[in-house]
């Protein structure tokens, strides 16, 4: 798919403030600093459409971008910021949960995971929560440029094995790098396919 236009629409902190045009949402979530905003920029070939930062917790609102006048990329705040206690588990801002559970236009939630780390409880809990809530999701491993191809394959197979403990059918999995654009075409193609239904 060719990206002809990408414009910032609005930032919201309430479900009722989300755009009501009926355009499909493709949203990005994951731990703070995993690379959500960077991946969105890579997908649309723009350096700072979505604001990125070296410091975790940069994105704190739900940010809508209109792509090709037709569909939305949605940048979400990360979960698992420092200061959130373990007992609280999936304790992140109520409006994000409200968006995820009740947004009718959410066609795919891309759950981002840093490829360098072993399966982490917080991500696994979030994946399971998404499944239980029947949210359509895909997994996206980020920062693949930081390790070798061998290590990438190894990490994916460890993750698959771990997921199989909880799930019979595994979700779609993408390997990406915002630095060298790995996985970009695959994700755009996936979005295009979903949009064509
Ligand atoms: P929050 O909005 O704070 O939740 O973070 P985020 O998930 O949006 O992460 P962001 O895109 O701001 O990136 C965090 C840091 O990781 C920045 O310093 C990015 O430059 C870096 N980064 C993101 N993606 C990649 C990647 O694919 N490769 C490398 N090497 N660095 C990346
Ligand atoms: Mg961000």
Image (cartoon, grey):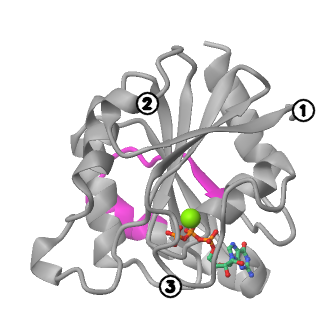
Residue identified by numbered label 3: 117
Asked if residue 121 is positioned above or below residue 172 in the image, the reply reads below
Asked if residue 30 is positioned above or below residue 188 in the image, the reply reads below
Q: Do the residues labelled 1 and 3 touch (CB within 8 Å)?
A: no
Asked where in the image residue 180 lies, by quadrant, the reply is bottom right
Within 10 Å of disc 2 (Cα), the crowding (few <14, some 14-19, many 20+) is some
Which residues are drawn in magenta? 160-175
Within 10 Å of disc 3 (Cα), the crowding (few <14, some 14-19, many 20+) is few
Of mark 1 and mark 3, the one earlier in the sequence is 1
Residue 182: mark in rendering: none
Of mark 1 and mark 2, the one earlier in the sequence is 1
- Tell me the SS state at disc 3: loop
Residue identified by numbered label 1: 2
Residue 115, given in percent of the width and then of the height, sits at 59, 77
Between marks 1 and 2, how big is the CA–CA gap?
Answer: 25 Å
Residues 35 and 156: in front is 35
Q: Which residue is drawn at 68% across and 15% down?
A: 196
Residue 18: mark in rendering: 2
> Nearer the viewer's eye, disc 1 or disc 2?
2
């Amino acid at each position: 798919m060719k990206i002809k236009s990408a414009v910032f629409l609005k930032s919201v902190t309430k479900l009722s403030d989300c755009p009501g045009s009926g355009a499909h949402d493709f949203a990005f979530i994951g731990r703070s600093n995993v690379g959500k905003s960077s991946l969105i920029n890579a997908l649309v070939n723009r350096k700072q459409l979505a604001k990125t930062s070296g410091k975790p917790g940069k994105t704190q609102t739900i940010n809508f971008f209109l792509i090709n006048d037709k569909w939305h990329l949605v940048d979400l705040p990360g979960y698992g910021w420092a200061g959130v206690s373990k007992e609280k588990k999936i304790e992140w801002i109520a409006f994000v949960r409200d968006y995820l559970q009740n947004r009718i236009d959410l066609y795919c939630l891309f759950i981002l995971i840093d490829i360098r780390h072993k399966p982490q409880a917080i991500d696994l809990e979030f994946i399971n929560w998404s499944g239980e809530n029947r949210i359509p999701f895909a997994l996206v491993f980020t920062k693949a440029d930081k390790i070798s191809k061998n290590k990438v394959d190894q990490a994916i197979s460890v993750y698959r094995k771990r997921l199989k403990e909880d799930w019979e059918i595994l979700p779609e999995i993408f390997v990406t790098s915002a630095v060298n654009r790995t996985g970009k075409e695959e994700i755009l193609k996936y979005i295009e396919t979903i949009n064509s239904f």
